[in-house]
Amino acid sequence: MTDVSERIETLAERARRDREDFEPPSNPPDEEAAMRYLTEGVGEVVALYIDARTGEMVRFTDAEFVLLEQALNDWLELYAACYGANLDGVFTVREVAELVVDTHSIRESALLLTGIPDRDREEAWFQQSRHSES
């Protein structure tokens, strides 16, 4: 495994940059950008956490946990902002990772955690995913 501390710092820096560079969509939702924040952000944090916990049982320092959770919550807040919603994320890496393992879906996990997108959009989203899986 690559140096975990270095990977955490890289993720934290990317999340900070994404937050600084974020431009709210003029006509929400921007589902493509939302999925990018989930897969390239939240998903990478969760993957690092799961790898570290199931592989070599890496112990994170308190500072590393702070950086991981800040990056995770930054990306979840950006995901919500892509739908025109404001989210004050206070999720732990562990709870998100457990949900991803349970649902096998970063998209479903984000929906369950944040309630975004709303129910009407969720149904359209579900139909679209089922159609694209065929």
Image: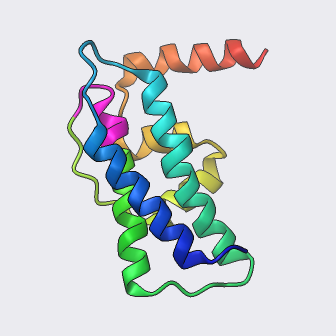
Quadrant showing the C terminus: top right
Q: Which residues are magenta?
A: 77-85
Identify the residue shown where x is 48% and y is 60%. Answer: 11
Residue 51, quarter of picture: bottom right
**In the picture provided, is 133 more to the left or to the right than 111?**
right
- Against 23, residue 78 (above or below) is below
In front: 16, or 37?
A: 16
Tell me, yes or no, if residue 34 can be seen here: yes
Estimate the x, y position of residue 9 in percent, counting from the top left: 46, 69
Question: Would you say residue 84 sits in the magenta stretch?
Answer: yes
Estimate the x, y position of residue 119 in percent, counting from the top left: 38, 23
Estimate the x, y position of residue 122 in percent, counting from the top left: 45, 22
Identify the residue shown where x is 73% and y is 83%. Answer: 56
Quadrant showing the N terminus: bottom right
In front: 130, or 6?
A: 6
Question: Which color scheme did the rendering employ for the protein?
Answer: rainbow
Estimate the x, y position of residue 60 in percent, counting from the top left: 51, 84
**In the picture provided, is 22 more to the left or to the right than 129?**
left
Identify the residue shown where x is 58% and y is 68%. Answer: 49
Tell me, yes or no, if residue 115 can be seen here: no
